[in-house]
Amino acid sequence: MSQDTIRVIIADDHAVVRQGIRHVLEEGDGVEVVAEAGDGEEVLELAEEHAPDIVVLDVSMPGKTGLEVTKELRRSGSEIGVLILSMHDDPEYVLEAVRAGADGYVLKDVAPEELREALRTIHGGTEYLTDRVTHQLSVGLREEIEQERTRSRYESLTPREREVLVRVARGMTNREVAEEFGISPRTVETHRERVMSKLRIHTVAGLTRFVVENDITEDED
């Protein structure tokens, strides 16, 4: 075995998928698959036993997920490289993988050579993300930033404005809200206009969606 051979553990809960990955990796030069795992706990045990250079992890596995395995490896101080090989290209998955400490993230439909290139890149000390995954990471970050901004706008609402927001989202009319609080419909309308202005949402449907997505089901102090 060459000193530059990359020693790899493959983890996926489907044996046929593991066999396919093994074939792809060992088809190229400089890669040795030292073990295979079918669940997250087994990955951690085999990693301790074999001390591989890189583990190739699926996101969804029984017991511990690929992301949980990644976090445990990082918490333990392990320097084993982690490549997430997943069918999921959702921005949330990519963002969580990077935060967990993964060194790379590629999709299962990548070309064999690209998968081998990902291993070589990570083994060389550099993170590896495909263009498609990089785009999804960017999307995820933008969505998170916008959510934080929107939450900040919500926190700028007064207690009364929050009460009005919840009731408008429930479908109550200005008159119904006014009767509940003992104020005029015009005052309710003013509160609603301020809510829309502060949240930068200009339709009742938009306010309703905001309340649902942020789980604002009760009045908040």
Image (cartoon, rainbow, N blue to C red):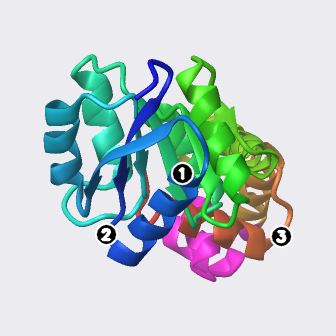
Q: Where residue 93 appears, x then y in whole percent?
A: 54, 53
Q: Which residues are magenta?
A: 161-185
User: Which residue is tagged 2?
Assistant: 13
Label 3: how many Cα within 10 Å (few below 14, some 14–19, many 20+) = few
Q: Which mark is residue 47?
A: none
Label 1: how many Cα within 10 Å (few below 14, some 14–19, many 20+) = many
How far apart are labels 3 and 1 at the CA level? 53 Å
| Residue 162 seen anywhere in this rendered image of the structure | no
Three-letter residue code for mark 2: Asp
Figure quadrant of the C terminus: top left
Q: Residue at x 68, y 81 (%)?
A: 173
Earlier residue among tags 3 and 1: 1
User: Which residue is tagged 1?
Assistant: 25
How far apart are labels 3 and 2 at the CA level? 46 Å
Q: Residue at x 76, y 69 (%)?
A: 206
* Secondary structure at numbered mark 3: loop
74 or 213, which is in the foreground?
A: 74
Q: Residue at x 43, y 58 (%)?
A: 58
Figure quadrant of the N terminus: top left
Q: Which mark is residue 203?
A: 3
- 175 magenta-colored: yes
Nearer mark to the viewer, of 3 and 1:
1
- Residue 126 lies in quadrant: top right
Three-letter residue code for mark 3: Thr
Earlier residue among tags 2 and 1: 2
Does the residue at mark 2 contact the one at mark 1 (Cβ under 8 Å)?
A: no
Label 2: how many Cα within 10 Å (few below 14, some 14–19, many 20+) = some
Q: Residue at x 74, y 59 (%)?
A: 192
72 or 188, which is in the foreground?
A: 72
Earlier residue among tags 3 and 2: 2
